Image (spheres, rainbow, N blue to C red):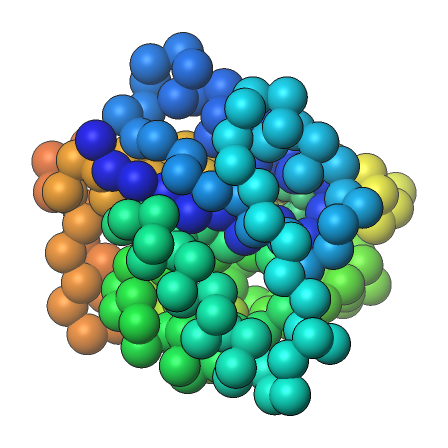
Amino acid sequence: MINLGILVSGSGTNLQAIIDCIEAKQLAAKIKIVISNNANVYAIERAKKHYIPTFIIQDSHFPAREDCDKHLVEILKSHSVDLVILAGFMRLLTPAFIKAFPLKILNIHPALLPAFPGLHVQEKAVEYGVKFSGCTVHMVDEGVDTGPIVIQAVVPVHEDDTEEALAKRILKEEHRIYPQAIKFFAEGRIEVKGRKVIIKGCRKIEGALENPKVEIFE
Ligand code: GAR
């Protein structure tokens, strides 16, 4: 059983997906604390509904971001957290935080990294005209969305997509792959070799996707 500390800044649908998998006994983990940098987000309500301890951290109460992160580390360590989960946590972490949990911080990003790092990425994918996008669970390093990739899911981007429609399609996949990535970690199946994440005992997938559908070679 691993102990999770989950950092949130928004509606918390990924948090909910993780809670649901734990409650359904699909994931052997305990959420020790949910931390937000905003007291008014629905993610905090979700945690409270499931009797999970919560904590609000306000950057403005600290002289520097680094001091805030050191405090965050203290809170997470005092709850014996083994793995830190960024679930829509919308602020960058300083090296002090990342060094305190080496290869023990996961993030979910709503694009197929290394394409479209940063913010507003569903809108950028629609505007760019890519035919596929998706989501990525990765380990957090000191860059922005640059850490080793654990698992990705691909979704089509349609010609008439809006940012909202694509975000909804991607979010559905986020809710599948994030609990799965945590499960890989909890089962000790993740090994990091340089940039690469090796997951022991995985089935390989075959075949290809195309969008739009190729018709002449069917
Ligand atoms: C998710 O789409 C997640 O991938 C994204 O924020 C959303 C949070 O939704 N994270 C980022 O963009 C991080 N750069 P949620 O609060 O409903 O889980």
Q: How many marks?
A: 0
In this picture, residue 83 sits left or right of residue 185: right
Residue 30, visible in the rendered structure = yes
Residue 158, visible in the rendered structure = no
Expressed as whole percent of the image width and height from the top left, the position of residue 161 reads 84, 43
Occupied quadrant, residue 181: top left
Relative to 162, residue 117 above or below: below
* Residue at 59% from the left image edge and 82% from the top image edge: 65
In this picture, residue 158 sits left or right of residue 195: right
Relative to 15, residue 126 above or below: below
Relative to 82, residue 181 above or below: above
Expressed as whole percent of the image width and height from the top left, the position of residue 50 reads 56, 21
Looking at the picture, tell me which residue is in the foreground, 166 or 105: 105
* Residue at 40% from the left image edge and 81% from the top image edge: 96
Expressed as whole percent of the image width and height from the top left, the position of residue 82 reads 27, 50
Q: Which quarter of the figure is the N terminus placed in?
A: top left
Residue projecting furthest to the bottom: 63
In this picture, residue 199 sits left or right of residue 49: left
Looking at the picture, tell me which residue is in the foreground, 161 or 92: 92
Residue projecting furthest to the top: 24
Occupied quadrant, residue 172: top right
Relative to 13, residue 101 above or below: below
Expressed as whole percent of the image width and height from the top left, the position of residue 128 reads 76, 66
* Residue at 42% from the left image edge and 15% from the top image edge: 23
Looking at the picture, tell me which residue is in the foreground, 34 or 215: 34
* Residue at 64% from the left image edge and 54% from the top image edge: 56
In this picture, residue 59 sits left or right of residue 74: right
